[in-house]
Image: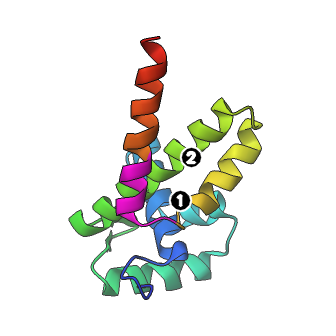
Amino acid sequence: MRRENGSATESSEDYLEVILVIRQESGRCRNVDIAERMGVTKPSVTKALARLSAQSLVKVVGRDVRLTQKGLCVARATLDKHEFFKRLLCDAGVDARLAAREACRMEHCLSEDSFQRLAAYLGNRRNEGDSR
């Protein structure tokens, strides 16, 4: 689950992000929902959820997959990065579908510190541009 730098693996982050988005959209999340959204098999989801559950990132109650507080923090951070990079790419003129795919890869390659600094830097530059 952890990379050498202590961050969650891409796969785990993707699962947590998808669980968060599904729960935001429908108020609940089932294995089949995750499998459909990610284009993976239900057994793959079951295996991933067992791993995430062992790491206290998710809890499966009946058929409902829920994020723990720890899992919710990772999921929100990953989703924030995804949305930031997608918006940045779209603003630069990249097709929205391509921007979404590439943002999914980009969200995993920066540390949280670097991401926060980049977001602050670009936010400041946009604000400076607005005042001119």
Note whether residue 120 is visible.
yes
Give the mark nearer the N terminus: 1 vs 2. Answer: 2
Measured from the top left, where is residue 4 in percent x and y? 43, 88
Labelled pair 1, 2 in contact (Cβ < 8 Å): yes
The prevailing secondary structure element of the residues shown in magenta is helix
Residue 111 position (above or below residue 103):
below
Q: From the viewer's perspective, is 56 left or right of 102? A: left
Picture coordinates of residue 130, whole percent (x, y): 46, 15
Name the image colouring: rainbow
Which label number is shown at residue 85?
2
Between 55 and 94, the one lying in front of the other is 94
- Residue 70 is labelled as none
Residues rendered magenta in the picture:
110-118
Q: Please say if 57 is above or below 34.
A: below
Q: Position of residue 37 (x, y in %)?
A: 62, 57
Badge 1 density bin: few <14, some 14–19, many ≥20, Cα 10 Å: many
For the point 67% across and 71% down, which residue is it? 40
Q: Is residue 10 magenta?
A: no
| Dot label at residue 107 | 1
Tell me where residue 100 appears, x and y as whole percent. Answer: 66, 47
Against 109, residue 81 (above or below) is above
